[in-house]
Amino acid sequence: MEARWRKTGQLKDIPRATHDSAGHPLKIGDIELPCYVLEDGRRVLAQGGMLSGLNMSRGTAGRGGGDRLAKFVGGKAISPFVSKHLYDVITRPIRFRAPGGNIANGYEARPQTQLSFFSCLNTQPLATMVRG
């Protein structure tokens, strides 16, 4: 996939992560989230870590590809509990190059985003759906 992105010029503007949380992820309750600091100073929560923290499998949701978490928050049953800010953050992940060189997707870790995410999770119908 990276070769295809390189041919289309999509790798030019991918920021690099200068620091990661190897060995000490962000812990919120019993959820551990890998996080990174990008060269431009943005702090990013790894998409894969968000999915793991929610006990969601990686890959796509339904047919047509796309981001599993974005499809989840856009679903009929969940969308009433998701703020516009959180929806915008999740549906526009940041593509970055992790310290090991791999390309990853993540979400900017701003306090507003974190509060939106966890207040959304604490909504009873959503908490039941996500945590089972």
Image (cartoon, rainbow, N blue to C red):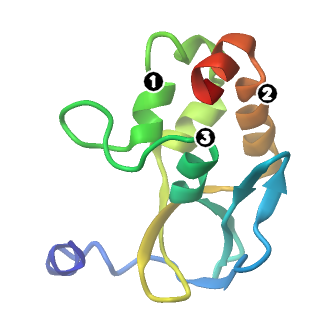
The front one of 9 and 81 is 81
At x 19%, y 32%, the residue is: 63
Kindly identify which residue carries mark 1: 74
Kindly identify which residue carries mark 3: 54
Badge number at residue 119: 2
Is 51 left or right of 114, judged from the image as shown?
A: left
**Amino acid under label 3?**
Leu
Label 1 neighbourhood size at 10 Å, few (<14), some (14-19), many (20+)?
A: some
- Quarter placement of the C terminus: top right
**Amino acid under label 1?**
Gly
At x 64%, y 28%, the residue is: 131
- The tally of labels here is 3
**Amino acid under label 2?**
Ser
How far apart marks 1 and 3 lie (CA) works out to: 16 Å
- The residue furthest front is 132
At x 53%, y 55%, the residue is: 47
Q: Secondary structure at mark 2?
A: helix
- Quarter placement of the N terminus: bottom left
Residue 28 point in image, percent of width and height: 83, 49
Label 3 neighbourhood size at 10 Å, few (<14), some (14-19), many (20+)?
A: some
Residue 122 point in image, percent of width and height: 78, 23
